[in-house]
Amino acid sequence: MKKFLPVSALVLGLIVLGGYQYRVEILDSLCGTTPPAPKAQVEEALENEAMILDVRMYVETRKEGANLVAEAKNIPLLRLLWNLDELPRDRTIITYCESGKRAGKAADMLNARGFTALSGGGILDLQKILTEKKSEA
């Protein structure tokens, strides 16, 4: 028992104070596997002035080399339900994160609360669509 207590305290300390990556992995494991919306649906929503919502944790968007979408609003998935008043109910919301897992969960949460939302998938997927859209213009 004496050995277990310091080890468990260390593990708890790493979880609470540890790097963001561990918390991101926990979030990803808890999230559903809602797939990203089809590319054509995301493109149509963008043409209709959709809002882009980044649901990554703040620390993920601040790290060196982080991929960002300039016109996106950042509300982490863990804070989403407390910030619903910051989101438009009259426009489609395209969610994205690093890999797409949290984006799918965020879209599900928003749709369940009366918003029109779809998952844009991971950041690289959405950036590809945005780049193609800009090159067509």
Image: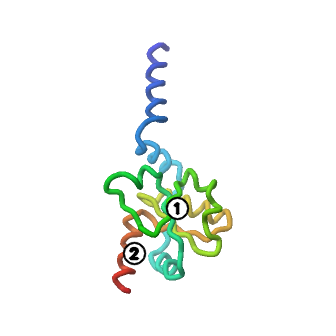
Numbered marks: total = 2
63 vs 69: above or below: above
What's under tag 2, amino acid-wise? Answer: Ile
Find the distance from the CA under tag 1 to the CA under tag 2.
17 Å
Secondary structure of the residue carrying tag 1 is helix
Whole-percent x and y of residue 123? 40, 63
Q: Indicate the secondary structure of the residue bearing disc 2.
A: helix
Q: Residue at x 54, y 54 (%)?
A: 77
Q: Position of residue 12 (x, y in %)?
A: 48, 30
Q: Quadrant of residue 68?
A: bottom left
Residue 137 lies, with reference to residue 101, above or below; the image says below
Q: Which residue is identified by label 1?
A: 104
* Image height of 23 relative to 6, above or below: below
Residue type, label 1 = Gly
Quadrant for the C terminus, please. bottom left
Residue in the picture at 41% in, 66% down = 69
**Residue shown at 40%/45% (left/top)?**
21
Mark 1 vs 2, N-terminal side = 1
Report the side of 63 relative to 6 (left or right): left
In the image, residue 90 sits, relative to residue 110, either above or below, namely: below
- Residue marked by disc 2: 129
Would residue 70 be found to the left or right of residue 108 on screen?
A: left
Camera-side residue: 64 or 112? 64
Which sits in the foreground, 27 or 63?
63
